[in-house]
């Protein structure tokens, strides 16, 4: 039995949500292997033109590297990509507003996306992606809208992200609301912090911008508000939540899994009032560790009945007290049978080849001290304090970690062997050489200095939403919009195009063509080139092509190779267009032999104007 001395004086979908006054359970899903995956998350998105919320589906994908990582190691998320199902009525909306035209249309799009990785030092990271949405509109000769092709959308992939493991499974997915910083999406591109974790801005030329401020969840109140929901992870990797110092193997780190989990059920919390929380403790002694216990003589041939207990320290934020200690005994009836040779078997637990136990802690009582959510974590290093009456030891034991188990194995003849698991939220490595292992632990006369410990503050395993002491005033009723729905509005009646107030008359500036592309990439036999007609007076017309800057050999001849076929361009003043140039036969020949090619974009304006050129690198 383990007894705390004066305990009162010691200090990824992935999230299960509830209504006000309920508890969020963090980390409640089992860990999965590191693997590429694609996850579609329903998002509630606030549309900038009318401030009503509607639903969009957002897709994220990727994979996490570094199998077998420990706390303090870095893991990298790669092959990450983003996609969004833009509402189909946008095309008709843009056409009726006079921004899009019959035929092919390009809509410039920018996306800011925040990613969350659980149990990492960094926690969240965000990136900006730029791309183009395309649609083809069919209209009658009199201008009547007929139809539009589905909006296809492409942005660059997310860059790889690197995360530092703190301990506990890493699950990476869309971040919760409020995870983006201030970005230039306010009026006149002013800085504004979005409500959500994804912001999509569609630009219809220079005249109109439409923003979608998105967070995992769905719209409520006929579009007047939103309800948050968890976002499932698109990649996971397993990292031990704790590392446990033990006399087996030989005073090193035991290959075990010991961690505190979310409660199976919880009650509500009100500010200034007492509430209880019943976390769970999970511990697993796998087959490899059982074999080490046999080698060390802690497990004897035949049946060994498991006994003992764990002391667990739990920290609360926004609570009084700030820390609680709990002692939980090993459940009765777990027997470890050691044969003369071969695998060790276990009965009475959750597995037959390992000691695997999940058990609730005694109810821990707290008082919520504010209106913010109260969060709970497995306590960090040196949080238990001094223990007395530790079975099989003399004197006082001071654990290094916040989870301490003293286990016993009793044979049929009544002999008992003990082993300790002193578990730290962090990383434990060899420290000062020559210091022998001692059960007394982190105290004079123990084994202070034997270990190099890098402690990490673990993620919260539960967060309680707290009801304010003074109920807020009832909300002002918001009238329902006309057919706001999560379905497809029927433009232009729903949503009605925003009123655009004409600005000052622009200055008269002759137009000039510009090549905006800063790098070219050949894909599926096409090379996208971005052109801009800068100025206010005059339409930019002409042809554009891509050719090599150097003389190259093609077949038996050496020449400057025209990589793409010429395409005619026509761009209104102040607008930008993306043209997809088809790779010609000679271009395909030289690209097959090279991953990169120095090229020149050559735009020839109609009339006698000089060509506009820009040297770039074309990759395939």
Image (spheres, rainbow, N blue to C red):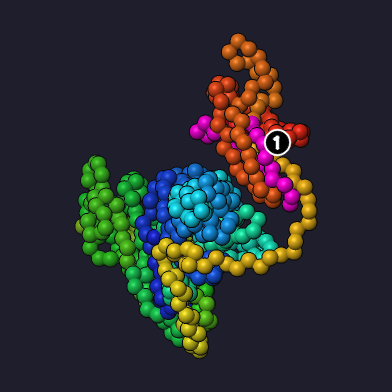
Bounds of the magenta span?
A: 523-545
Q: Nearer the viewer, residue 380 or 36?
A: 36
Residue 47 showing in the rendered view: yes
Residue 239 showing in the rendered view: no
Question: Is residue 14 rendered magenta in the image?
Answer: no
Residue found at x 59% / y 53%: 110
Residue found at x 66% / y 68%: 501
Q: Is residue 439 left or right of residue 451?
A: left
- Residue 291, relative to residue 443: is it above or below? above
Give the farthest residue toward the front.
142
Q: Which residue is mark 1?
A: 606
Q: Nearer the viewer, residue 534 or 146?
A: 146
Residue 384 in percent (x, y) is at: 48, 69
Looking at the figure, which quarter contains the N terminus?
bottom left
Query: How many numbered marks, from 0 up?
Result: 1
Residue found at x 51% / y 44%: 78
Residue 497 in percent (x, y) is at: 55, 65
Residue 151 in percent (x, y) is at: 48, 50
């Amino acid at each position: 039995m383990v007894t705390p001395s004066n305990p009162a004086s010691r200090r990824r979908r992935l999230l299960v949500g509830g209504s006000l006054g309920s508890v969020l359970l963090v980390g409640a899903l089992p860990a999965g292997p590191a693997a590429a995956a694609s996850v579609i998350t329903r998002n509630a998105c606030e549309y900038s033109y009318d401030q009503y919320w509607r639903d969009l589906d957002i897709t994220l994908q990727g994979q996490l590297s570094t199998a077998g990582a420990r706390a303090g190691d870095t893991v990298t998320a790669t092959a990450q990509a983003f996609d969004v199902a833009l509402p189909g009525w946008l095309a008709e909306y843009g056409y009726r507003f006079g921004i899009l035209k019959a035929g092919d249309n390009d809509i410039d799009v920018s996306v800011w996306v925040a990613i969350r990785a659980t149990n990492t030092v960094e926690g969240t990271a965000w990136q900006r992606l730029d791309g183009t949405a395309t649609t083809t509109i069919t209209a009658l000769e009199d201008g009547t809208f007929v139809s539009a092709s589905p909006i296809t959308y492409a942005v660059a992939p997310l860059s790889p992200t690197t995360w530092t493991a703190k301990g506990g499974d890493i699950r990476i997915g869309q971040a919760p609301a409020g995870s983006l910083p201030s970005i230039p999406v306010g009026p006149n591109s002013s800085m504004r912090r979005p409500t959500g974790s994804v912001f999509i801005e569609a630009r219809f030329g220079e005249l109109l911008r439409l923003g979608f401020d998105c967070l995992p969840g769905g719209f409520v109140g006929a579009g007047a508000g939103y309800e948050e929901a968890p976002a499932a992870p698109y990649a996971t990797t397993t990292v031990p939540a704790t590392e446990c110092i033990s006399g087996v193997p030989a005073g090193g780190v035991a290959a075990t899994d010991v961690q505190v989990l979310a409660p199976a059920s919880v009650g509500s919390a009100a500010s200034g009032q007492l509430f209880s929380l019943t976390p769970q403790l999970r511990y697993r002694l796998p087959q490899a560790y059982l074999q080490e216990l046999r080698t060390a003589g802690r497990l004897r041939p035949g049946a060994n009945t498991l006994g003992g207990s764990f002391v667990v320290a739990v920290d609360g934020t926004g609570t009084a007290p700030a820390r609680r200690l709990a002692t939980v005994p090993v459940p009765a009836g777990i027997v470890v049978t050691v044969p003369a040779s071969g695998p060790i078997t276990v009965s009475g637990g959750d597995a037959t080849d390992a000691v695997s136990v999940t058990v609730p802690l005694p109810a821990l009582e707290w008082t919520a001290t504010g209106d913010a959510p109260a969060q709970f974590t497995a306590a960090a290093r040196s949080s238990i304090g001094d223990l007395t009456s530790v079975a099989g030891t003399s004197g006082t034991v001071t654990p290094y970690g916040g989870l301490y188990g003293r286990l016993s194995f009793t044979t049929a003849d009544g002999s008992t062997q003990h082993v300790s698991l002193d578990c730290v939220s962090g990383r434990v490595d060899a420290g000062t050489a020559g210091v022998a292992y001692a059960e007394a632990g982190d105290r004079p006369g123990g084994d202070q200095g034997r270990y190099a410990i890098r402690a990490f503050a673990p993620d919260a395993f539960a967060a309680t939403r707290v009801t304010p002491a003074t109920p807020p005033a009832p909300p002002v009723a918001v009238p329902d919009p006309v057919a706001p729905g999560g379905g497809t509005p029927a433009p232009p009646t729903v949503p009605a195009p925003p009123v655009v107030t004409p600005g000052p008359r622009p200055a008269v500036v002759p137009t000039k063509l510009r090549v905006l592309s800063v790098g070219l990439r050949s894909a599926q036999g096409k090379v996208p080139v971005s052109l801009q007609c800068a100025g206010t007076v005059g339409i930019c017309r002409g042809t554009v092509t891509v050719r090599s800057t150097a003389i190259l050999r093609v077949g038996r001849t050496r020449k400057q190779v025209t990589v793409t076929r010429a395409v005619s361009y026509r761009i209104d003043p102040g607008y930008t267009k993306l043209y997809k140039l088809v790779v010609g036969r000679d271009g395909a020949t030289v690209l097959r032999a090279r991953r990169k090619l120095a090229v020149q974009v050559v735009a020839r304006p109609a009339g006698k104007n000089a060509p506009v050129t820009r040297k770039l690198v074309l990759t395939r």
